[in-house]
Amino acid sequence: MKVLVTGGAGYIGSITAAELVQAGHAVVVFDNLYQGHRAAVHPDAAFIEGDLRDTDAVKRLFQEHKGIDGIMHFASFTLVGESMEQPLMYLRDNVIAGSNLLEQAAAHNVGRFILSSTANLFDDPQTMPIEPDDRIVPGSPYGESKFFLERLLHWFERIYGMRYACLRYFNAAGDTANRGEDHDPETHLIPIVLQVALGQRDKVIIFGDDYPTNDGTCVRDYVHVVDLAQAHMLALENIQDIGSRKYNLGNGNGFSVLEVINAARKVTGHAIPLEVGPRRPGDPAVLIASSTNIREELGWEPRYPDLEQIVSSAWEWHSAHPHGYAK
Ligand SMILES: NC(=O)c1ccc[n+]([C@@H]2O[C@H](COP(=O)([O-])OP(=O)(O)OC[C@H]3O[C@@H](n4cnc5c(N)ncnc54)[C@H](O)[C@@H]3O)[C@@H](O)[C@H]2O)c1
């Protein structure tokens, strides 16, 4: 298939684009390099530097790359905290970017659309693990922008027949030998912990250790980025047959912040000092995905469910690229 990957120079998008290329698909990457890295784009993928908020640039993209069969839409502003400070970056820009893309996708009869959605749709979970059909309460303007894109897809299917999958990732983690997580600022736990091991930070701050969990720290569902990539490919290949779907993607095994730090201590051999700070407002104690429906319907099976494997793969990339793609 010919697949357009927006945000394909970013963390999850670049690794998924590489997996697509390896699986024999023709890949076109569109990214404004706001957080992405040119060096992360697989050499066999076509690369266009451009911004999805720019209507003309998106039109040109589809004129110059005819015959796109499917789209994987990773490009987005992605930070919950930032969205609480600058809501319109999310409620306006993320929505305009996605709308421009969908407008051209429909105009060019693209039949398959895979959206990077988020666990932040479920701010007030009633039960754990969280099922895809559980009550949606976006936890921030970021989550709301993703929910709005999910609703746009609902209508684009009704009106234009576009099949879609909304993949709500919980915590993407891990790297491959050639591509890894390199954000500025870095907000994700595993790369931050590894920065301590690399001597780039003195310590890790834990936001609260008095949650109702085994060790008092928050529990999250870490899913390896290569497993996410596989879920995208399975969805792309199957939605025409099985219909549009919403899947929550996680291991189903939660790991606490302390467990992540202990895994990193073991993998890196570094003591990784920590300090306990206050809780962050709005952080739920536990967030775990139920991925039963994608396992049953598409046979998705995470290949890297083990925490130490996930942290090791991240350490391999970060220790080989201590300054990210700059080095
Ligand atoms: N990382 C996670 O744990 C996680 C969890 C849930 C959902 N997601 C979602 O997955 C997707 C990918 O996340 P990531 O961690 O790889 O983020 P990322 O920032 O590494 O990748 C996003 C890419 O999109 C590009 N981009 C942003 N706005 C753009 C625009 N207007 N036009 C063109 N390109 C643009 C950026 O330059 C970047 O390369 C995002 O949509 C994010 O919201 C991520």
Image: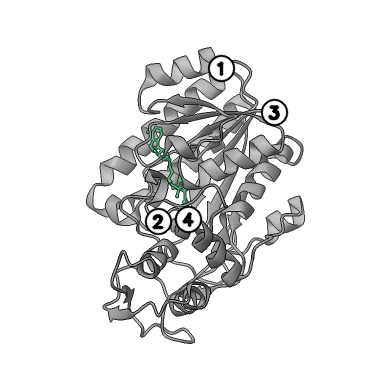
Q: What element carries label 4?
A: helix
Q: Which of marks 2 and 3 is in front?
A: 2
Mark on residue 322?
2
- The residue at 41%/45% (across/down) is 325
Label 1 and label 2: CA atoms lie apart by: 36 Å
Label 3 and label 4: CA atoms lie apart by: 33 Å
Query: Residue farthest to the top?
Result: 63
Q: Which of marks 3 and 4 is in front?
A: 4
* Residue 262 on image: x %, y %: 48, 79
- The residue labelled by disc 3 is 1
- The residue labelled by disc 4 is 320
* Residue 150 on image: x %, y %: 50, 42
- The residue at 45%/86% (across/down) is 215
Q: Which amino acid does label 3 sit on?
A: Met
Q: Which of marks 1 and 2 is in front?
A: 2
Q: Is mark 1 on a helix, strand or loop?
A: loop
- The residue at 58%/38% (across/down) is 17
* Residue 65 on image: x %, y %: 56, 17
* Dot 4 alpha-carbon crowd within 10 angstroms: few under 14, some 14 to 19, many 20 or more: few
| 246 relative to 204, above or below | above
Label 1 and label 4: CA atoms lie apart by: 35 Å
Q: Where is residue 50, by image quadrant?
A: top left
Label 4 and label 2: CA atoms lie apart by: 6 Å
Mark on residue 65?
1
* Dot 1 alpha-carbon crowd within 10 angstroms: few under 14, some 14 to 19, many 20 or more: few
- The residue at 29%/70% (across/down) is 280
